[in-house]
Image (cartoon, grey):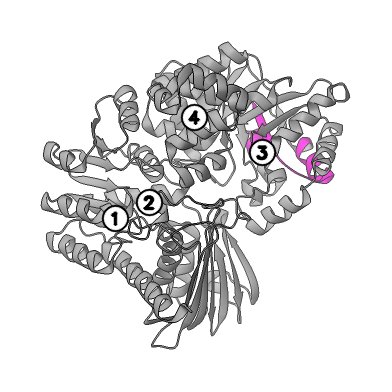
Amino acid sequence: MAKINLGVIGIGRMGITHYSIINSHPDIHIKAVVDTSGLILSLFEKYIKGVNTYKAYVDLFKSESLDAVIICTPPTLHYPIAIEAAKKNIHVFSEKPFTTKKILGLELSELFEQKGLVNQVGYVNRFNDVFTKVKEYLNLGIIGNVIRFRSEMFSRTITKTEEGNTWRDSHENGGGALFEVASHAIDLIIFLVGKPDKITGSSLSKVFSKNVEDTVFATMLYKNGISGTLNVNWSDESYRKPTNKIEIFGTEGKILADQHGIKIYMKNANPKFNLKEGWNSIYITDVFKPVPFYVRGNEFTSELYHFIDCINNKEIKNRCSFDDATGTLEAIEAILNDYEQNGKF
Amino acid sequence: MEPIDKIVFGDNQFFGINHMSQEKAQQLSEKFHDLSSIINVYQVAFDSGIRAVMLNSNDRAKSICEYFKDNKTKYPGLSWYPSIPYPHKYANLISEKGIIPTINEILFKDNSAMGLLGMIATGSAAVLGKDAVKMMKMLIDVEMRMYKGLNVKAIFLQNIITDLLLGYDVKEIFVEYCHYIKSKYKVLPGLITQNMPKLLEKLKEWQIEEVVICSSFNKIGYLMSPGIDSYINAATQNDPSKYQIMAMSTLASGAINAKEAYEFINRQNVQSVVFGASSKKHIEETISLISLELTVS
């Protein structure tokens, strides 16, 4: 089988990781990288033979014949790059939060589906072995009907006063805790419970950033009666690593989960799933699936290998498509609007 | 190559690191807030016969190193196995500032003496950047500074860095790292990895020998890519005079009981085990259960 020719656009923190992981895939040939930093490009030129380098993505599309690209630029560039890729019938893996506007997300989603191109966004929690187990439990109705939930995310991303000069400190560029961090917690809600019908009680507050929020609160309401809250803080030094926490209460029990494990309270025992009445603990060591190559966590390898599986076999449904990610953009816009209209004094 | 210690005492328990439970991690971090509570645990480990310590170069490690340097006569015959760098320090800085400003900060701002000299000699990371090997050597020196004066046996590169570089498949960086550790520090180069079979295969291909490989190795295959069978085969076929294997995560963060865990490990062709524990009972139990029969030929 011919190898899949791939380009990596944006060699920042995620681009560096994705390059390493995807380069381990036996079906992949990385043909080129794009970055605006001359320094990064000169490192590639010096140490990595046979990979072409470009300063501008337009030159990449002009000069290379590619099958797929991984986009890890600041979010505001995801849209124009994906449009160029679609013109050339190139499959796209885009980092989250996908684009910066719902309308752009919708357009891309339709375009890629219409062209039959694989489209995926890097909401990595969907590939975490614990959260996929939670999803399995919910699908099987292990805790009955979901009534309410809480989705939280904490990290020590911004812990000092910001000068306001990076893309992370601007909403227009897709920065801020809402786009950057809360998007993961929102995606997890959509993945596990579904898209909210209404958002209310939003608050965005600053800790260290100059132009954007560092914390996010919001309440999510569903027509079927489910409700839940979102609570995010990317300036919380008490967390060593970015952490998602989710609590889901149902008519038959309750699930508490983070990336490391699940605590599940059962009203009645479920022998088929080896769950006893009362509290049960399931750890990552009980549910993990080994990956072929490990860099930063099983989920980072799983998501990229899934992207390649989808390219190799069009029958496979992508587990985090542009359409899925557009749902998150819709919620982000609703939070921004709600805060603008109701949250300010 | 010089044989490494068969049992090495690790440090995760001191720094609020637990791969299975954040609650447990938080409890540990609280328990070991004071240096004295950390030293007490080391004392228990030494009383139980431990003579080797692995210590990651995080912010808190500095005070541990200081203590052992100041009290050298109290602890004769100790061997140190530093692991560098503390990856989260870099990861957080990169998130905040970007890659180049991070390297600038680490090399030039955090280290006033080196900063001044470094600035004059090299300008900044922007100039250095073109020479990744030189930059790597400077970063190693920065990270290794806290261990100066301790009896270091091997220097390990943390798995996040080893595995990231392994994915890039760049021979030169591995050659230079191992050479630098051997020539400048006169100790064994160590690589921590979660992809032991692949790393071993690459090191052979690149003809890099006399390296210590530290990797998760446990009965349930946790953090062992691509899988447990491949690990067992790679270890079985390994020549320990060229590559010594140190097993870590032997209990898979507590998923396996100690007796079962070491019954498995004792059957593998590994030369060393690094483990962390904080109670006398667990430390003594672990030591009594480890009996590695295969030694360096």
Q: Secondary structure at mark 1?
A: helix
- State which quarter of the image contains the N terminus of chain A: top left
> Which of the labelled discs sits on residue B7, or is there none?
none
In the image, residue B135 above or below residue B102: above
For the residues bearing labels 3 and 1, Cβ distance under 8 angstroms: no
Which residue lies under the disc numbered 1? A76
Name the front one of labels 2 and 1: 2
Q: Quadrant of residue A117 in the image?
A: bottom left
- Residue A98: x and y in percent read 31, 59
Real-space Cα separation, disc 3 to disc 4, in angstroms: 35 Å
**Mark 2 vs 1, N-terminal side:** 1
Q: Quadrant of residue B166 in the image?
A: top left
Q: Is residue A256 left or right of residue B43?
A: left
**Mark 3 vs 4, N-terminal side:** 3
Which residue lies under the disc numbered 2? A167
The chain carrying label 2 is A
The amino acid pointed to by label 1 is Thr
Real-space Cα separation, disc 3 to disc 1, in angstroms: 36 Å
The amino acid pointed to by label 4 is Ala
Residue nearest the viewer, comparing A319 with B204: A319
Tag 4 and tag 1 share a subunit: no
For the record, the magenta segment spans B264-287
Q: Secondary structure at mark 2?
A: helix
In the image, residue B135 above or below residue A306: above
Which residue lies under the disc numbered 4? B234
Tag 3 and tag 2 share a subunit: no
Which residue lies under the disc numbered 3? B59
Dot 2 crowding, Cα within 10 Å, few <14, some 14–19, many 20+: some
